[in-house]
Image (cartoon, rainbow, N blue to C red):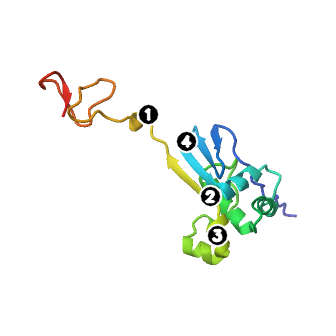
Amino acid sequence: MKRTTPPQLPRMREDALVIDELPDEVLVYDVNQHRAHCLNQSAALVWRACDGNRTPSEIANMVSAELATPFSESLVRLALGQLEKASLLEEAQSVSPQYLVLSRRRMVRHFGLVAAVVVPAVISIVVPTPAQAATCTPSGQPCNPVKLCCTACNPAAPGGPKCF
């Protein structure tokens, strides 16, 4: 007899994350990957509902009640695909590949006009290192060993070393 394992229920990742909850979105900074993620309201609701005990259908019902608008299981699976891609779920979920890459046109065709309002969105960026984020000293300003010149330092400039 062949054994089948039940599908794993989605669980949000909580370790090595800095979470900042705003009124209509959630900002998540992944300390390990140095990536920042912005979850819109519906994606954040799906993410918070991923406790390892709820099915996508149950999550859809929960989000529908919270938003007071229909939220289908397909939208939950779309959100799960985005959350998985951003490494915000505990373990790899079996999300249908069709939900991982959807064009806006295909999304509106698939989900209808509700997509314009409640479609989940996870936007990610790589956070620069402190050295990459530092600004430089503009031309004409004195050279500074802590804050480097944008171009180069001219040590023989009249009045002392200046950036040029």
Image location (x, y in percent) of residue 49: 77, 52
CA separation in Å, label 1 and label 3? 38 Å
Q: What amino acid is labelled 2 in the image?
A: Gln
The residue at the far right in this view is 1
CA separation in Å, label 2 and label 4? 16 Å
Earlier in the chain: of badge 2 and badge 4, it is: 4
Which element type, helix, strand or loop, lies under badge 2? helix
Earlier in the chain: of badge 3 and badge 2, it is: 2
Q: Nearer the viewer, mark 1 or mark 3?
A: 3
Q: Dots 1 and 3: beta carbons under 8 Å?
A: no
CA separation in Å, label 1 and label 4? 15 Å
Q: Dots 3 and 4: beta carbons under 8 Å?
A: no
CA separation in Å, label 3 and label 2? 15 Å
Crowding at mark 2 (Cα within 10 Å: few <14, some 14-19, many 20+): many
Q: What amino acid is labelled 1 in the image?
A: Pro
Q: What amino acid is labelled 3 in the image?
A: Ala
Q: Which residue is painted at 50% across and 49% down in the image?
A: 125
CA separation in Å, label 3 and label 4? 30 Å
Q: What amino acid is labelled 4 in the image?
A: Gln
Q: Is residue 127 above or below residue 149?
A: below
Earlier in the chain: of badge 1 and badge 3, it is: 3
Image location (x, y in percent) of residue 144: 28, 24
Q: Quadrant of residue 138?
A: top left
Which element type, helix, strand or loop, lies under badge 3? helix
Q: Quadrant of residue 119?
A: bottom right
Which element type, helix, strand or loop, lies under badge 4? loop
Which element type, helix, strand or loop, lies under badge 1? helix
The residue at the far bottom in this view is 109
Residue 130, label in figure: 1
Image location (x, y in percent) of residue 102: 58, 69
- Circle 2 residue: 82
Q: Nearer the viewer, mark 1 or mark 4?
A: 1
